[in-house]
Image (cartoon, rainbow, N blue to C red):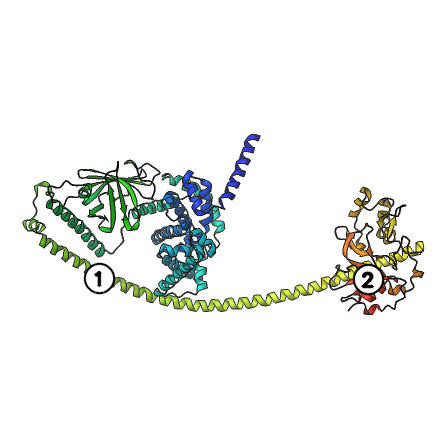
Amino acid sequence: MAETQGQLILNQVRKLVAVQGTRRLTDHQLLEQFLARQDETAFAALVERHGPTVLSLCRSFLHHLQDAEDVFQATFLVLARKAASIRKREALGSWLHGVAHRLACKARVRAARRDSREVTTTVEVEARSTDDLTWRELRLVLHEEISRLPEKYRAPLLLCYWEGKTQEEAAAQLGWRKGTLKERVHRARELLRGRLTRRGLTLPAGLATALLCGRTGTTAAASALVGPTTKAALAFAVGNKAVAGGVSAVAATLAEGVVQTMFLTKLKIAAVVLLTLGLLGAGTAAVICPASDGDQVAQGAKAQPGKPKTDHDRLQGTWVLVSGERGGEPPPEGFLGGFKLTFAGDKFSIQLKGETKGPGAYMLDPAKTPREINLTPDGQNLRGIYRLKGDELTLCLDENRGPRPTEFKSPAGTNHLLLVLRREKAVGDKAPKGGESPPKGDAKDEKDPAKLQLRIKELQRELLRTREELDAAKRQLELARALAEQARAEALAQRDLAERARRQAEQELERARAAERAARAAAEAIQGDAAKRQVSANNLKQLALAMHNYHDAHGHFPPAAIYSKDGKPLLSWRVLLLPYLEQENLYKQFKLDEPWDSAHNKALLKANPKVFGLVDGKTHYRVFTGEGTVFKGKEGMRLQTITDGASNTILIVEASEAVPWTKPEELPYDAKKALPKLGSVVKDGFHIGLADGSVRFIRPPVNEEILRAAITANGGETVDLDKLGR
C-alpha cells in the first residue's frame, strides 16, 4: 500500500514537472510533440494556452453557456484530428480562430432553429442587458470580417490583439522581422476599418481593441474544460467517433462535420453556396467544359493515329471518382460520382457537384516505379504515385507535404489519399440504355461542331445574365444591410456618448474619493507620528528618573557598563537600572559576572521591558561615553560634579543605530572626531534626556557646536539648548 501511494505521488510530481516544461515550448514545438507520440501533456498545454481566447469567441457568438462550451470542445477535437495538416504551426491561434468561427456560425444556426421550435429556460453566459447584446453584435461583425482577411494579415492581428502578445513576441513566433509585422498589422487594421466602414460601422481604436480582447474573464471557465476536452480529443484523433465521456454528442457532431468540410477543402473542391439560379448555371458550364476538353483530346488522338500514346496522352480527358479513402476512412456522402478530375494538356481542373476549381499544373515521371505524379493546385504541391490500367486511374497522394507514398494504400492515421477513378465517356461514345435512340435532331447537333459551339456560347451568355442578376440582387441586399447598419451605428454612437459621460462622472467621483483617502492617510500618519513621539519622550523621562533613583541609592549615576575584574565590559547600564524600573525579578536572573552574550544572559534578551522601546530585542536609547561626558571611565559621575549645569548636559539620547538592550555598546565621543548619528525612532528629529530629568525634542538642522557642548559635563561652555535645533 505504501509503495502504491509513493508511486502515485511520484507520478503526480512527474506530471507537474512535465506541465511546467511544456509551458516554455512554442505552439509549433507542442504540436510536433503531440504528433510524434500523441502526448497528452503537450495537447493539454495547447488547450490551456488557447482555451480562454477560444471560449471568449464562442461566448461572443452564442447566448447559451452549453452551446459555447460545445463549440469550444469541438474546436479542439478538430485540432486533434487535423493537427498534421496545419501548415503554419507558428500561427496556431489564427487557425483556431478560423475553426472556432466556422463552428460557432454553425452552432448559432442550430440554436436559432432549436429556439424557434421550443421554449426552454436556459442559463446564459452573461446578463443580457441591452448593452451586452450590442457588444455581442459588434464582436460578431468584427470576428466575421477578421475571418475574411488574408492569412498574412489575420495571423499578426490576432496574435497582437486577440492573444495579447507584444509585437516582439508576435514577430518571433511568426519568424518575421519586427518591421514586417508592424507593416502587416497596420495594413490589417486599415483593411478591417475599410470593411467595417462599408458595413456602416466606425469604431474608435480603443473600442475595437476592447472587442478584440481574447480573454474576457474566461480563464477560470476554460481551465475547468482542459481535462475532459484533452481526453476526448485524444480519442477523437485516432478515429473514435464515440468519443469518451467529457464532451457532448453535439460537440462531436460539429467536429465531424467540420473535419469532412476541411477534407473537401484540402482537395480544393469545396462547393460555394450560391442561389438556385447560380448553382444551375455553374453546373451547366462545368458539365460542358469537360466535354469540350474531351473532344479536343479525341481530335488530337485521331490526328496522329500511328504515334504510340504516352501516359500524358492516355491521361487526357475527364475521370470520375468511383472509390476513395483517406487515412483508412471512406469519403463523405455524395462525394463518389460527384468528384471529377479533368486533364487538358499540361493543366488539370477539379469538379464537384457542378463547380469547377482550377486550372492547376501537373507533372508525370513514368520512369519511376511506381510512377510519380505532382499536382500543384493554387500553388500547393501534392506529391503522389499513379497507375493507369485502361480506363481506370489510381492515385495515391500525400495531402500534407509529407513523404511521397510508395504503395497504393491509405493506412489509418496517415494523410494519404487513395483515389480510384474511371474515364468519363465523351459525348456520343456511349449508346443509350435499353435500346433507346436519341432524337435525330439532337444526335445530329451533337455531331456538328459548329452547332455545338453555338450552343456553348448561348449557354455561356445565359450564365452571364444569371450572374449579373445575382450581382444586382446582392448589391440591393448590401444596400439594405448598409442602411440598417448605419441606423444601428447612429444608435450606438448616442449610447457611446452617454456611456462616456457616465464613465467620466465615475472617474471624477473616484478622484474625489482618492483625494479623501489620501488626506485621511496623511492625517493618520501625522497622528501616528505624534503618538510615537509622546511614547518615546515618556520612556526617556522614566529612564532619567531611574538614573536619579540610582544616584540617590549609590551616590552617583550608574556607570556605562558592569565591568569584570580585568576591566572588560559585561552588561549595559540598562541592566543596572532594572530594579529602579520595577523589573527587580528580571535583574536577579542576570549573572552579573558573565558577559551579555553568555548562554545564560543571552537567553534573557527575549524579555521585553517596554521602557527601552525594544524592537526585536534592540533599543535606540544609548549614552555618550568618552572624555568629558557624564559616563566617562568605569565609575559613575556624581550630580554635583556636572559644572555645566544638569539642565544643559545630555544624559540619554535616541541613537540612529539600535543595539541589543543588554549589550554594553554606547556612543563614543571624541572632540576631534565626527559625532555619531542620532535619531530614527520618530520622524523629523530626535529626543534627548537631560541630567535634570527633563526631555527635549530636537529638529534638524542641528547646531553641532551646541550639541558638543551639551554632551560634555564640565566643558565650561555657554549652552543655549533653544538654539540646538530648528
- Could you tell me if residue 225 is visible in this image? no
Residue 87, x across and y down, in percent: 37, 47
Position of residue 648 measured from the top left corner of the image (x, y, whole percent): 87, 65
> For the C terminus, which image quadrant?
bottom right
The amino acid pointed to by label 2 is: Ile
Closer-to-camera residue (31/101): 31
Kindly identify the amino acid type of the residue bearing the numbered disc 1: Glu
Q: Quadrant of residue 188?
A: bottom left
Residue carrying label 2 = 688
Mark 2 lies on a secondary structure that is: strand
Residue at (44% x, 67% y) in the render: 495
Residue 557: tell me if it is visible: yes
Work out whether residue 650 or residue 48 is closer to the camera in this orientation and state it.
650
Q: Which mark is residue 468?
A: 1
Residue 233 is labelled as none
Q: Residue at x 17, y 39 (%)?
A: 391
Could you say whether the residue bearing mark 1 is in a helix, strand or loop?
Answer: helix
Residue under the image location 18 percent in, 45 percent down: 316
